[in-house]
Image (tube, grey):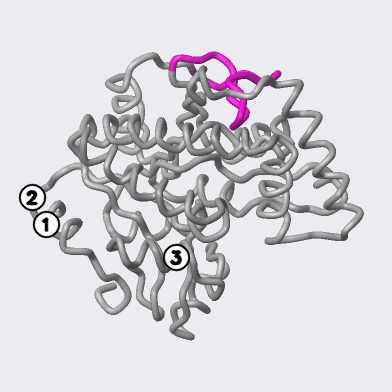
Amino acid sequence: MNDFLVFSEEVAQAKAEKKPIVALESTIISHGMPYPENVQTAKAVEQIIRDRGAVPATIAIIDGKIKIGLTDEELEFFGTSNNIEKVSRRDLPYVVAMKKHGATTVAGTMICAQMAGIRVFATGGIGGVHRGAEQTMDISADLQELSRTNVAVVCAGAKSILDLGLTLEYLETHGVPVIGYQTDVLPAFYSRTSPFRVDYRLDSVEEIAQFIETKWKLGLNGGVVIANPVPKEEELEESYITAIIEQALNEAEKQHITGKAVTPFLLDRVKTLTGGKSLKANIALVKNNAAMAADLARELS
């Protein structure tokens, strides 16, 4: 594995000193937000984790090397370059073998985090079952990864552009528990609520850490979804954002946008249609998840 992994000085020192570490994805920088908000948010999120007593490890691929922890210059590169592959499980060997640059998705980041011995990962929202998947079979690889990789994922639920009900059904089938942090219902990314309940509500980081430790000590492999609602002051009302997402989905269908291109297209259209409110909510929820993940990593360590 030493042939593939490169640790930043900060992360290498944290591992040597057994400090808590939080993994962060890079797709949100390269494909999820516009510049300069993407880089500003990435740096702010890293600082939030440091301020709460943990060490951030933003994960990406540079010239075929899996970097565990990025410098400010590398964050800037991923925020501005147009030559960045989007890397999930399927893409990882190609991007590494061909010595390309890649931004890791939720699935890609989970794989690399487990390789690096990192157990907690903060992101915005997980992927899931896309609307109309009964015909298209468009299901995010994030869900399969959650069923097999031992990393706890702190998120604001699944992205609300997805079919949340089918996403929960898929996770249940594959034995992935969905924990609501101080909530009984699944947050829907931009909104704190949805029509769907989580599997278990836990109200403290200590309880969540105990749940995770017990799961893995029992030999039950696979991740855990910790659904952490967007801060109340930044949430978008459920019916308002649902109508906008429906409009964006119709536009994607008319333009025959499929596969990897769907999520970036929808996030961009939702940002435009909400006049930037969705981007503000996205930034707030990512920061909120980073803070909670840092507390969880500290508790687990």
Residue 282 horizontal/vertical position (percent): 54, 37
Residues marked 2 and 1 touching at CB (< 8 Å): yes
Quarter placement of the N terminus: bottom left
Magenta span includes 189: yes
Pointer 1 local density, CA inside 10 Å: few below 14, some 14–19, many at least 20: few
Please, what is the three-letter code of the amino acid marked with disc 2?
A: Glu
Q: Which residues are magenta?
A: 182-200
Please name whichever residue, 200 or 255, is drawn nearer the observer in this view of the structure.
255
Residue assigned mark 2: 17
Residue 101 horizontal/vertical position (percent): 46, 75
Q: Secondary structure at mark 2?
A: loop
Residue 300 horizontal/vertical position (percent): 23, 34
Residues marked 2 and 3 touching at CB (< 8 Å): no
Please name whichever residue, 283 or 18, is drawn nearer the observer in this view of the structure.
283
Please state if 243 lies on the left or on the right of 51 as rendered: right
CA distance separating discs 2 and 1: 6 Å
Q: Which mark is residue 69?
A: none
Q: Secondary structure at mark 3?
A: helix
Please state if 115 lies on the left or on the right of 169 as rendered: left
Residue projecting furthest to the left? 17
Residue assigned mark 3: 78
Position of 179 relative to 78 (above/below): above
Residue 29 horizontal/vertical position (percent): 48, 56
